[in-house]
Image (spheres, grey):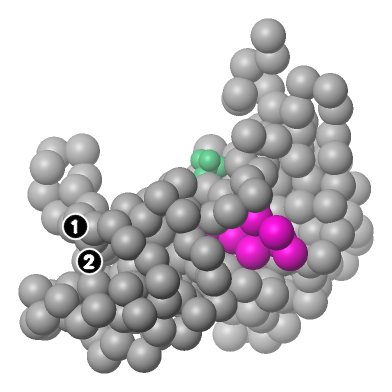
């Protein structure tokens, strides 16, 4: 049996082929994106010229440590490419992201990129999104009231389930890179991701949610049988 970490690395390695000299590249967050940054650093060491925008403090630290050239998004403006992992890859390359809590910057960076390539092991591909809890980043003012409004919004989009505050390893509320808190919506299935996305976005206090719709242009999925590339 192939180890999941090997599959993630294979997907990351396959996505390297989309990176060419002179590109401005958004770097994702998570264990699969971590492999990509490691492999990209080897290319940079060998002479590839890129300038990268990380999607989290974690990825920033890794890139700096490995000598990958870094800039802020405002310094580079538009990105040629963004390579990031996902928690679920659904029909039409709709994604659930934010398992690592970096969804806000990830979405800003994905939106600023001409192309978003998702890298993942093939178990992330699903017929219906929602088995993975959907992260929702909110401000902490009135969090209880925001959660109540979110429950209504979720029901109005035809979903059932519960919202739970995300905790860090020490059991404290998980705080994002931008100082917000995260709720995870345990829904099981999301029959209409677009309807849910707009219902959630309408709730005051919501900063961002982990539904990425119409952003990914390609998914590179690694399974025991090899690499499969899906285009939107
Ligand atoms: C972080 C993310 C990650 O890309 C997602 O959680 C997948 O992570 P991994 O590659 O570790 O499975 O969205 O916010």
- Which label belongs to residue 212? none
Q: Is 33 situated left or right of 50 in this image?
A: left
Residue 59 makes an appearance in the image = no
User: Which quarter of the image is occupied by the N terminus?
Assistant: top right
In the picture, residue 101 is in which quadrant?
bottom left
Residue 91 on image: x %, y % = 70, 59
Q: Gap between marks 1 and 2, in whole Å? A: 8 Å
User: Which quarter of the image is occupied by the C terminus?
Assistant: bottom right
Local packing at callout 1 (Cα closer than 10 Å; few below 14, some 14-19, many 20+) is some
Q: Nearer the viewer, residue 36 or 145?
A: 145
Is the residue under label 2 in contact with that under label 1 (CB below 8 Å)?
Answer: yes
Residue 40 on image: x %, y % = 74, 45
Tag 2 residue? 181
Task: Residue at 10% x, 81% y: name it.
Answer: 145
Q: Is residue 76 above or below residue 41?
A: below
In the picture, residue 49 is in which quadrant?
bottom right
Circle 1 SS class: strand
Residue 205 makes an appearance in the image = yes
Residue 96 on image: x %, y % = 52, 58
Residue 19 on image: x %, y % = 85, 56
Q: Residue furthest front?
A: 158
Part of the protein shown in magenta: 89-98
Task: Residue at 41% x, 50% y: name it.
Answer: 188
Tag 1 residue? 165
Q: Residue furthest top?
A: 1
Task: Residue at 20% x, 82% y: name it.
Answer: 149
Question: Does the segment drawn in magenta span residue 227?
Answer: no
């Amino acid at each position: 049996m192939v180890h999941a970490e090997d599959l993630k690395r294979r997907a990351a390695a396959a996505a390297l082929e989309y990176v060419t000299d002179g590109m401005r590249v958004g770097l994702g967050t998570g264990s699969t994106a971590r492999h990509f940054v490691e492999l990209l650093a080897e290319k940079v060491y060998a002479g590839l010229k890129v300038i990268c925008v990380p999607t989290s403090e974690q990825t920033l630290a890794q890139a700096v440590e490995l000598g990958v050239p870094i800039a802020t998004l405002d310094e580079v403006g538009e990105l040629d490419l963004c390579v990031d992992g996902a928690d679920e890859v659904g029909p039409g390359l709709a994604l659930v992201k934010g398992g690592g809590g970096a969804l806000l910057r990830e979405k800003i960076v994905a939106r600023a990129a001409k192309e978003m390539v998702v890298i993942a092991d093939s178990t992330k591909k699903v017929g219906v999104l929602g088995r993975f809890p959907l992260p929702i980043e909110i401000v902490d003012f009135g969090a209880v009231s925001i959660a109540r409004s979110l429950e209504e919004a979720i029901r109005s989009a035809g979903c059932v389930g519960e919202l739970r505050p995300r905790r860090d390893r020490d059991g404290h509320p998980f705080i994002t890179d931008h100082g917000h808190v995260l709720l995870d919506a345990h829904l099981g299935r999301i029959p209409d991701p677009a309807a849910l996305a707009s219902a959630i976005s309408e709730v005051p206090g919501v900063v961002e949610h982990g539904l990425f719709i119409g952003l990914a242009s390609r998914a590179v999925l690694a399974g025991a049988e090899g690499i499969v590339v899906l285009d939107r």
